[in-house]
Image (spheres, helix red, strand yellow):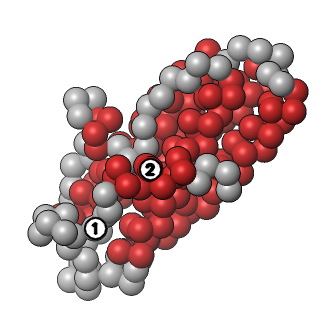
Amino acid sequence: MQPNQPFLADIQELRRRAREHIERGAVTDSYQSDVENVVKLLNAALATEIVCVLRYKRHQFTARGLSADSVAQEFAEHAAEEQSHADRIAERITQLGGEPDFNPEGLATRSHSEYVAGKNLTDMIKEDLVAERVAIESYSEMIRYFANNDPTSRRLMEDVLAKEKEHAEDMLTLLDKVGKQGL
Ligand SMILES: [Fe+2]
Ligand SMILES: [Fe+2]
């Protein structure tokens, strides 16, 4: 591990694992964590959320096929929820005295999840499922890192993680439905 990367996790490896297993301002003296590193991690989560918003939006407007309407609706809901995660994470970064990074330059590299347009409905849903699984792995690692040293960031990411788990379930259900209808 490199000294300035005490956390994670080879992103490539994390992405590979997710693909492979598709089926299934308030810093006080008592603050125990390394603020700089926490801000760095939260910025990675922020980039991940923004990329997820963009991907779900792209899928919302390009969904075609018999169940396109209901699936597009689901994509739209997820996009809105990822946006609210991005907002909450940015707020936490600011609380810690850090700078939330919204720079589009390098966004895809900072993000742990990927932006894939997807060729058809099944493809899109699969890509979303993979992205959710990447987020779940990456946020779980962050939560373990925050542990008791930054309980506020930990609780925030636990909340977000719970939602990502729901999202993954939703995508798995959709994949099954779309698969059965042969769309
Ligand atoms: Fe999210
Ligand atoms: Fe999600």
- Residue type at mark 2? Arg
Query: Mark 1 — residue?
Result: 7
Near-viewer residue (20 or 138): 20
Q: Secondary structure at mark 1?
A: loop
Q: Say which of marks 1 and 2 sits in front.
A: 2
Q: What residue do we see at 44% from left, 31% from top?
A: 115
Q: Name the N-terminal-most of marks 1 and 2.
A: 1
Near-viewer residue (117 or 43): 117
The answer to whether residue 23 is left or right of residue 57 is right
Residue 39 lies, in percent from the top left, at 25, 59
Residue 34 lies, in percent from the top left, at 20, 73
Q: What residue do we see at 49% from left, 37% from top?
A: 52
Q: Secondary structure at mark 2?
A: helix
Q: What residue do we see at 47% from left, 67% from top?
A: 140
The answer to whether residue 76 is left or right of residue 154 is right
Q: Residues within 10 Å of mark 2 (few under 14, many from 20)?
A: few
Q: Is residue 100 visible?
A: yes
Which quadrant holds the C terminus?
Answer: top right
- Residue type at mark 1? Phe
The residue most toward the right is 181
Q: Residues within 10 Å of mark 1 (few under 14, many from 20)?
A: some
Which quadrant holds the N terminus?
Answer: bottom left
Residue 94 lies, in percent from the top left, at 28, 54
Q: Which mark is residue 16?
A: 2
